[in-house]
Amino acid sequence: MESSSNLLKQNFELRHRVEDLEYQNAKLSKQLYQAITKANSLENVHKRYVEKEQERIAKLVAQGVEEASQKIRKEYEPIINKLNNKIEELEKKLNTNSANSNLPSSKNKIGVAIPNNRKASEKTIGGQKGHKRHKLESFKEEEITETVEHTLEKCNECGGELKEENVVTSDIIDFKVKVYRTRNKIHNYKCLKCGKIISANKDLPRGVSYGNNVNALALSLMNESNVAINKVRKHIKGITNEEIDLSEGYLVKLQKRAAEKVENFNEELKKEMPKLKILHWDDTVVKLLNTEGNKENKIKNGIIRFYGDC
């Protein structure tokens, strides 16, 4: 009887404990539900806050970008317009030909036809009636540097005696190239007062050298006429009856020395060129003697570029 009573007691206690646990579980479940609900609510609040902040930041960024864009546009718009005008101008130049500009027909692109706008004329070919003729005038007496008499003693046909009828003149204008060799004897002195050695002419080069006229002609042919170096040598050798035979190496050094003397002028010219309203340029491909680098390649390609405002 006592064991049954104990079992009943334990059973009662266990039931009471189970009920208590169920109550605690229900209470905890309710608290958990309230916590989850509150968490969801906080999450929604946080989400709405993040969305608002993102919208606010996006508006601030967009406003900042717009303000920066307007500032940059205001600052660089004149430069952009200037560049666009320059592009338009260059495009027009690319499309120029002998028909719409003063460009010679030899500069036309391949495939561009040369228009012939001339109309047929009823005039005869050649000089027209009343057109002033251009011819050489007879020399004035003070202009004549030499007079040559052409006479005959006997008839060329039969050997008979001749009687002079009249004299006609034949004026010929020509030039001669004369090579001269000048030896300059430069006297040097010693000052008895200060002891210094004084030269009568310290500017003249010592030894043997070519004169200013030879150098000027060579530079003019190379730079003004764009004549190749080997042809400059042949030209000067020809007109001097082979008395002056410049080496191609000398011509290269002459060109270099002349370039060094005009360095200051070139620098000033570079500063003035951008100020010109109209600027033209032209390239000419040339062959140059290679004096540096690989000696096996004696000839190298080069370009002579001309800049001008007319």
Image (cartoon, rainbow, N blue to C red):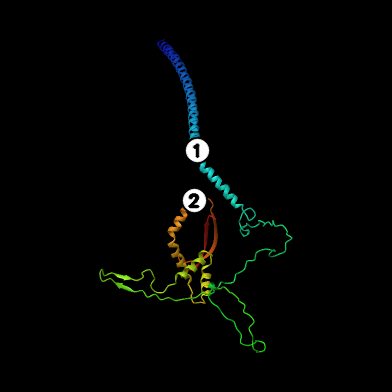
**Residue 258 in the image: above or below residue 208:** above
* Viewer-nearest residue: 201 or 36: 201
Tell which circle, 2 or 1, labels the residue nearer the N-terminal end. 1
The residue at which mark 1 appears reads as 74
* Viewer-nearest residue: 226 or 193: 193
The amino acid at mark 1 is Lys
- Comparing labels 2 and 1, the label whose residue is closer to the camera: 2
C-alpha separation, residue under disc 2 versus residue under disc 1: 25 Å
Looking at the rendering, which quadrant does residue 12 occupy?
top left
Mark 1 crowd level (few <14, some 14–19, many ≥20, 10 Å Cα): few
Residue that protrudes farthest toward the right in the picture: 122
* Viewer-nearest residue: 172 or 298: 172
Question: Horizontally, is 106 left or right of 219 in the view?
Answer: right
Q: Position of residue 128 (x, y in %)?
A: 69, 63
Total numbered badges shown on the rendered structure:
2
Q: Quadrant of the N terminus?
A: top left
**Image marks 2 and 1: residues in contact by CB distance under 8 Å:** no
**Residue 27 in the image: above or below residue 283:** above
Q: Residue at x 54, y 43 (%)?
A: 81
Is residue 288 among what the camera can see? no
Q: Position of residue 104 (x, y in %)?
A: 61, 58
The residue at which mark 2 appears reads as 275
Q: Could you tell me which secondary element the residue under label 1 belongs to?
A: helix
The amino acid at mark 2 is Lys
Is residue 275 among what the camera can see? yes
Mark 2 crowd level (few <14, some 14–19, many ≥20, 10 Å Cα): few
Q: Residue at x 50, y 28 (%)?
A: 55
